[in-house]
Image: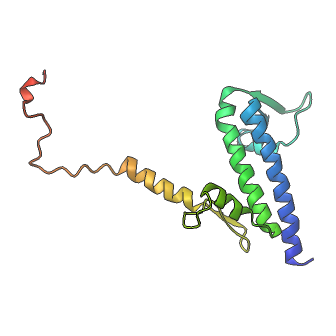
Amino acid sequence: MSSDQISMIIGILVVILGCVYAHKAWMAGVQGKIWYWQGFLPFTLVSPWIVIFPPKENTLCKVKEAMWIHLVMGPLFLISALVMISSGLDLTGLPGTEYVNSFFTMGTPDKTPIIVFDKQRYSLRFPAVVKTGQKAAKMFFDLNMKLKGEDDLLPADHKSIPH
């Protein structure tokens, strides 16, 4: 098999996994349910992404229903589905990340892309998240008020402030 055929097969499998995550996003976001494996803690934390089928009776797989699932797991599964489907489509030769980027940037090509997939290295980059993170960090943590020593921080009639 050539590398293009292997890339096509991997891409189809990744798209199928993305569709599974889209179903899990529906289950978590709308119905508030996730399936997880109740066992060793590190596996329990990642098990919602691994457990695909609904649990059966008398197994370690359980169903969890809670409000936090709507708020946290639904968006996480949706992001996972979006990344998997778009990168899988790129592996099959279709413009998956191009469509995702044009959707989120509203068709303007000069905006920072959301997802960049490198087909040769099978790597993902998220430049918009990095750019937004830098701007948010500057906004929250770069609180330089540029005060000088002679600046007065009290009102003109500071005797009116009760002590």
Res. 103 visible in picture: yes
Q: Looking at the image, which residue sits at the far bottom?
A: 2
User: Is 40 left or right of 162, judged from the image as shown?
Assistant: right
Q: Looking at the image, which residue sits at the far front?
A: 107
29 or 124, nearer to the observer: 29
Whole-percent x, y for residue 130 in the image: 53, 58
Instruction: Work out which quarter of the rendered image holds the C terminus and state it.
Output: top left
Res. 39 visible in picture: no
Quadrant of res 88:
bottom right
Whole-percent x, y for residue 145 in the image: 25, 49
The tally of labels here is 0
Quadrant of res 26:
top right
Instruction: Work out which quarter of the rendered image holds the N terminus and state it.
Output: bottom right
User: Is 162 left or right of 39, judged from the image as shown?
Assistant: left
Q: Looking at the image, which residue sits at the far top?
A: 162
Q: Residue at x 86, y 68 (%)?
A: 8
Q: Residue at x 78, y 35 (%)?
A: 27
